[in-house]
Amino acid sequence: MNENNTKSIWKVIGASSMGTLIEWYDFFIFGSLSIVISTKFFPAENPTAAFLSTLATFAAGFVVRPFGALFFGRLGDIIGRKYTFMVTLMLMGGATFLIGCIPSYESIGFWAPLLVLILRLLQGLALGGEYGGAATYVAEHAPLGQRGYWTSWIQTTATFGLFISLVVILLTKGFLSESQFDSWGWRIPFLLSLVMVYVSYLIRKKMKESPEFSKAKAEGKTSTNPLKESFGNRYNLKFVLLALFGAAMGQGVVWYTGQFYSMSFMKTVMHLQSDQADTILGIALLLGTPFFVVFGWLSDKIGRKWIMLGGMLLAVLTYRPIYESMYQLSNVEQKVKVNETAEVPRGPQSTETISITKTQYEDQTEVTRTGMIHQSGKLKGQPMTKTTVHLAGKNYMLLVLLIFIQVIYITMVYGPIAAFLVELFPVKIRYTSMSLPYHVGNGIFGGLLPAVSTYLTTNAEASNTPQFYLAGLWYPIIIAIVCFIIGSIYINNKSTPATHE
């Protein structure tokens, strides 16, 4: 590539990445704040049910992504990549902003979770159209033989979106008291979306259409019915199914295990203090993100297949040992108690009556809060007991390492996949054809993971199952191994630029 071409593609990546990053930020804010949201938009009488309802609402946004892929993919193959993902950007930003404006369950009752669900579905539809557009747009600017490297920059946006959502939350908590954040501060990350989306809109507005699509349109070779040509053509449908069951399905569960289930596991199973869990995940994501580009570049040299499948196989073989090690880091039964101090309950003017017990161990502090919430002078609900753990020293560093390893698996499966999907399909139906398997794999198989795995873990704990904390891993392990087997047999490891019609 000459210098002008290099500058040109960096502008393309910058503009595409900025918008995609903000869309992922919008989408992930809900997951990052799921524990807080469960107390605002759902009945407080049963915290576990409220949290599971929140995860289900979170998953709903993923489930509708394939429909967004079909709708916006069709538009992208008919009118162009640029204009389509301009629409998805505005839809996502508006929905995220409005979530921050919804009154609580105590104020408007069942309307609160209903409105959240509707806006979450709009987010999912928007994201269903965004990723395929951005990945296709960048790939169609990249030279042949370098698509893995250049499209891998788009892949970093999902992780950076989650990372930025965690940073914004931690900064907001840092500037506000705990009660202020719980009362209204949690809305700030949602409301900030409006400013970020506006800036991204101004940047994307200056972009030009991709050269490959412009050429196809000028020659009259664009599709008039992308859905029929993508899924009604048996030859192309085989590639769609291979993309889903041989790559995207396994990639989806590995991604969401490392980025979402790990966060939920730290907070709800290890009982790690929320800010510390967010910080640990943020550090691991920051350290691991450059490897998206490393594995994208490597896939140009040795092929996409075994890098992606290798990440899935490593996940299958090591998830249980990794999560067993994570659990034992906060398992007080294995630790030596150093001292214990008790604090008196809060005063009568407080909205809560809470007794706090702090137990100090060699490498962590365990804080147990027991109390009852008061409202208008009356007790509301049942006595609540909450225990949080704060890790220190080598245990803290070890937990960062264990999450980092999972992020490396994510970069292996996700770094090369945009180039892999783009190269499977011809220009005229590329947006539609690649978007559907990607969003079914990520939106359904991946997006359901937090809810399904948390449900499996909760049931196992209620049944007093030994190692109940590992029960949730069966879902990603089974999906990943099935995908590995199919991909090993049917995916061609050679570069596969799309030539079929």
Image: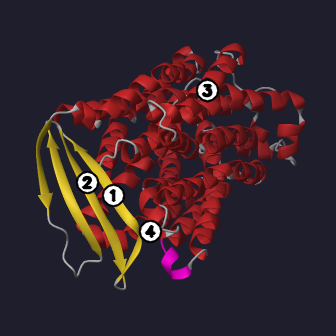
Query: Distance between the Cα atoms at labels 1 and 2?
Result: 7 Å
Q: Tag 4: residue type?
A: Val
Label 2 secondary element: strand
**Res. 21 mark:** none
Q: Residue at x 46, y 27 (%)?
A: 409
Answer whether labels 1 and 2 touch (C-beta < 8 Å).
Answer: yes
Q: From where the camera sits, is residue 439 visible?
A: yes
Residue at image mark 3: 478
Upstream in sequence: badge 3 or badge 4: 4
Image check: 126 left or right of 334? Answer: right
Q: Name the mark on residue 368.
A: 2
Q: How is the image coloured?
A: secondary structure
Which residue in the structure is indicated by mark 1?
385
Of the two numbered discs 4 and 2 on the same chain, state the one appearing first in sequence.
Answer: 4
Query: In which quarter of the view is residue 422 placed?
Result: top right
Q: Is residue 101 shown in magenta?
A: yes
User: Amino acid under label 2?
Assistant: Thr
Q: Residue furthest bottom?
A: 376
Say which residue appears at 82% left-offset and 42% top-offset.
219
How would you rate the neighbour count of disc 3 (Cα within 10 Å): few for under 14, some for 14-19, many for 20 or more?
A: some
Q: Which mark is residue 195?
A: 4
Q: Position of residue 165 (x, y in %)?
A: 40, 54
Asked whether residue 3 appears in the rendered view, the answer is no
> What residue lies at 26% left-to-right and 34% top-to-bottom?
333
Q: Nearer the viewer, mark 3 or mark 4?
A: 3
